[in-house]
């Protein structure tokens, strides 16, 4: 996010996606309807839902960019997840409808071969969606924005579904007309699957998902390198939007005065914040060494011993 | 929490019983209106299922992937109930339009009896539910109880409409249906707002935050409060406090101060509070920025 070009990209990404998908939706729906291809119409509907999705994401990122205030002391970052949860729930219902409709057409056997030109329409939309996917993926990765990334995968799913439409139309033209609704069915199922995956991730983030274990272990290792830290009680992280909130509980010598413990704690805070730009806030909770776990490790040898016994790496000191 | 889940199961059982009762009596008595109203009970069934799922999943202890617990699931269940209610408003509007077409059958005494039964059970469920929700501080149970209350109101509306039809006042039915739809819409909007607020990590009401601040400031040993952050996660209230203490104290003494702050917060906000108290030096003299073993 340090490159100003990336900042610009991240700001533009939702708009590019919005305008691009609006154009594609109109194009596909028109060509699909005129040429009589249900696969292309389904594909166009998918683009149309993306337009709605992008609008929701633009609104959501406006909200999530607001700084923390009295009523939202942890910031507004979760709005992004709410935005994507709303979009994908909507898409889920819609794609279920699409699948159902296609099944009806296949069973009735009422399919007719689409016009030759719809094939070109589908090929154009594959290319359009793929370019938009590449752009949004770059912007989303650099900005670490789940909403923009979700949008990127949305575009990739669109490109894939257009490929299915291309195949379906080609088969319908040269083999049998029923291929067109079957392609529509496959496209619908693809959208459905995509929605389920994205919805799952949005929900998981809304319920305070933490960082992966490797990262919390890395945090532990960094904290242990600070002089005076005897043990780590816990490292708790949760996603508050594009960024993470980090709580670290450390054990310091109980004889240490507050001026010094504060210095250690603020050094840990500064160190972690410097190392990872995804950290929104780091709080260090200092607890004195508990004698029930043996005498305080005083020098480095004892500390090393404690580490080798797994005393400070795992979580034996956690209070109930 | 076990009793909370048991209550949610009772809710579900009642909803299932109502669906079965309405459908079977509706078929036996030949009442279209009763069969239609079974659809609402089906909505109740969905909502009750969502509450059970959220209480079960939300009650799981914190794990590596979710170090702050799973309480937020309750807010999702509230969102779900809100959507279910919105769906019943749409259904009610549809059926009201149907009635305008003039396909009413003769008013049924059986339908009135079923409506009366529904009022009774819904009122009972909402009363017990509010009590359980208050004791467990569970937003999902609270929502479920409010939902039962709305059921009681809408069953009353159905009963009034039926009585009106018996007396020959057919317009009464539609008038009541409009008010019912408005009432459900109000609750649906309110619940959606509550779900969004919870999912957004909104703070507790200002008065409560101020109360916590006062309590922390007056705790012996606390020289000042530099930050208070509050949020809700299901039935738990999370409170993060940063207090300032005397620099010359030892870590052990400062820890005792934070323990006192913990207890003070607990006695102010109740047993469902999860407080984390960090302490800072009042005048930070030392800022150690060098790190040994820096990669």
Image (spheres, coloured by chain):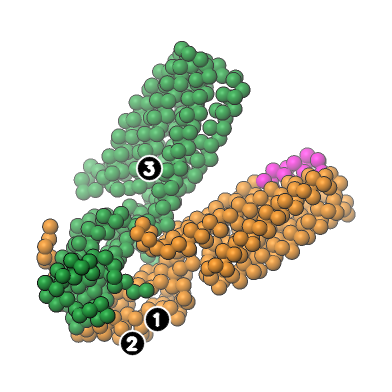
Q: Dot 1: within a 10 Å radius of its alpha carbon, few (fewer than 14), some, or many (20 or more) residues?
A: some
The CA span between labels 3 and 1 is 43 Å
Name the image quarter holding the C terminus of chain A. Answer: bottom left
Q: Is residue A228 above or below residue A26?
A: below
Q: Residue at x 76, y 60 (%)?
A: B117
Among the 4 quarters of the image, the one containing residue B282: bottom left
Residue B263 disc label: 1
Chain assigned green: A
In this rendering, position of residue B27 left or right of residue A210? right
Q: Chain of mark 3?
A: A
Q: Are marks 3 and 1 in contact (CB under 8 Å)?
A: no
Q: Position of residue A161 (x, y in %)?
A: 42, 29
Residue lying at the far right in this picture: please name it: B167
Q: Are marks 1 and 2 on the same chain?
A: yes
Q: Chain of mark 1?
A: B
Task: State the extent of the magenta-drawn residues as a range.
Answer: B91-104
The CA span between labels 1 and 2 is 12 Å
Residue lying at the far top in this picture: please name it: A174
Q: Are marks 3 and 1 on the same chain?
A: no
Q: Position of residue B40 (x, y in %)?
A: 68, 51
**What residue is disc 2 on?**
B220
Q: Residue at x 44, y 46 (%)?
A: A199
**What residue is disc 3 on?**
A150
């Amino acid at each position: 996010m340090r490159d100003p070009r990336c900042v610009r990209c991240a700001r533009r990404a939702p708009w590019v996606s919005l305008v691009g998908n609006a154009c594609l939706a109109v194009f596909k729906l028109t060509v699909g309807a005129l040429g009589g291809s249900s696969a292309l119409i389904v594909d166009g509907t998918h683009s149309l839902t993306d337009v709605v999705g992008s609008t929701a994401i633009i609104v959501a990122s406006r909200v999530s960019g607001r700084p923390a205030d009295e009523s939202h002391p942890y910031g507004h970052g979760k709005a992004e997840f709410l935005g994507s949860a709303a979009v994908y729930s909507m898409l889920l219902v819609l794609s279920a409808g699409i699948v159902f409709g296609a099944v009806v057409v296949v069973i009735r056997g009422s399919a007719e071969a689409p016009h030759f030109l719809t094939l070109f329409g589908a090929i154009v939309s594959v290319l359009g969606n793929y370019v938009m996917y590449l752009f949004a993926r770059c912007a989303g990765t650099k900005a670490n924005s789940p909403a923009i990334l979700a949008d990127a995968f949305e575009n990739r799913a669109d490109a894939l579904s257009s490929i299915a439409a291309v195949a379906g139309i080609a088969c319908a033209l040269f083999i049998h007309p029923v291929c067109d609704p079957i392609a529509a069915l496959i496209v619908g199922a693809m959208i459905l699957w995509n929605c389920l995956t994205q919805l799952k991730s949005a929900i998981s983030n809304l319920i305070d998902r933490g960082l992966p274990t490797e990262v919390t272990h890395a945090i532990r290792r960094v904290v242990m390198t600070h002089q005076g830290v005897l043990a780590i009680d816990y490292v708790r992280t949760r996603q508050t939007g594009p960024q993470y909130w980090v709580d670290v509980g450390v054990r310091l010598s109980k004889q240490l005065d507050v001026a010094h413990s504060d210095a250690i704690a603020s050094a840990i805070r500064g160190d972690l914040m410097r190392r990872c730009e995804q950290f929104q806030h780091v709080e260090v909770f200092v607890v004195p060494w508990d004698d029930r776990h043996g005498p305080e490790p005083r020098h480095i040898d004892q500390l090393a011993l404690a580490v080798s016994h797994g005393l400070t790496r795992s979580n034996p000191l956690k209070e109930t | 929490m076990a009793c909370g889940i048991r209550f949610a199961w009772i809710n579900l059982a009642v909803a299932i019983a109502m669906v079965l009762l309405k459908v079977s009596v509706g078929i036996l008595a030949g009442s279209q209106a009763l069969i239609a109203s079974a659809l609402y009970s089906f909505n109740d069934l969905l909502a009750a299922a969502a509450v059970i799922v959220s209480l079960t999943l939300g009650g799981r202890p914190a794990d590596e992937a979710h170090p702050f617990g799973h309480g937020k699931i309750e807010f999702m269940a509230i969102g779900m109930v809100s959507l279910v209610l919105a769906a019943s408003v749409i259904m009610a509007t549809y059926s009201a339009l149907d009635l305008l077409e003039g396909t009413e059958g003769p008013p049924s005494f059986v339908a009135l009896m079923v409506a009366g039964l529904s009022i009774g059970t819904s009122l009972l469920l909402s009363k017990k539910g509010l009590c359980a929700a208050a004791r467990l501080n569970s937003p999902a149970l609270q929502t479920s109880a409010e939902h039962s209350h709305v059921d009681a109101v809408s069953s009353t509306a159905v009963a009034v409409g039926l009585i009106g039809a018996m007396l020959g006042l057919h317009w009464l039915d539609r008038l009541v249906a409009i008010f019912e739809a408005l009432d459900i819409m109000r609750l649906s909007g309110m619940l959606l707002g509550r779900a969004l607020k919870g999912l957004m990590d909104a703070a507790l009401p200002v008065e409560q935050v101020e109360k916590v601040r006062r309590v922390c400031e007056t705790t012996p040993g606390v020289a000042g409060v530099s930050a208070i952050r509050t949020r809700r996660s299901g039935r738990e209230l999370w409170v993060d406090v940063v207090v300032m203490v005397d620099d010359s104290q030892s870590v052990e003494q400062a820890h005792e101060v934070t323990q006192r702050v913990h207890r003070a917060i607990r006695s102010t906000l109740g047993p469902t509070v999860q407080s984390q108290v960090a302490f800072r030096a009042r005048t930070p003299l030392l800022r150690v920025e060098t790190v040994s073993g820096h990669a």
